[in-house]
């Protein structure tokens, strides 16, 4: 099992990679997906649609789930932060 400190370090490194890759693709995403919701993870656009529920459904199928991901309107900056995390390996009983 990975310690919490190791997990946190890996998460922060992945988050920084995700932000860096997004920054390089920002203008193309805004141009190519204008008016749509975009699911972004693992350095790429995973899904895009005008219906946010369709994008959410695709993102929920990712296995393993990415450590950092975002769903945002193409015109807006994504917020790459944990909203809800169901992992329980670090919870004590």
Image: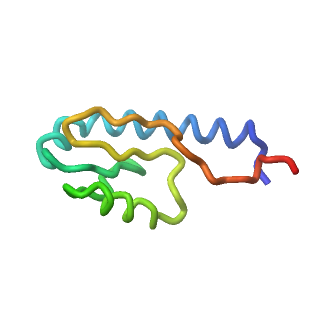
Image side of residue 7 versus residue 64, left or right: right
**Residue 73: quarter of image:** top left
Q: Nearer the viewer, residue 51 or 16?
A: 51
Image side of residue 76 versus residue 13, left or right: left
Image side of residue 8 versus residue 13, left or right: right
Write the residue at 88% across / 51% down. 93
Write the residue at 47% across / 33% down. 16
Name above or below for residue 48 compared with residue 77: below
Write the residue at 35% across / 47% down. 71
Quadrant where the image shows the N terminus: bottom right
Q: How is the image coloured?
A: rainbow
Name above or below for residue 60 compared with residue 89: below
Give the x, y percent position of residue 63: 51, 65
Give the x, y percent position of residue 43: 37, 47
Give the x, y percent position of residue 80: 44, 37
Q: Nearer the viewer, residue 90 or 42?
A: 90
Q: Residue furthest right?
A: 93
Q: Nearer the viewer, residue 3 or 70?
A: 70
């Amino acid at each position: 099992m990975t310690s919490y400190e190791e997990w946190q370090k890996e998460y922060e490194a992945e988050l920084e990679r995700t932000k860096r890759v997004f920054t390089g693709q920002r203008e193309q995403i805004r141009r190519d997906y204008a008016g749509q919701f975009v699911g972004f993870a693992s350095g790429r656009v995973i899904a895009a649609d005008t219906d946010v529920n369709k994008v959410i459904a695709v993102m929920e199928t990712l296995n393993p789930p990415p450590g950092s991901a975002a769903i945002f309107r193409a015109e807006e900056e994504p917020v790459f932060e944990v909203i809800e995390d169901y992992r329980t390996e670090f919870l004590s009983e």
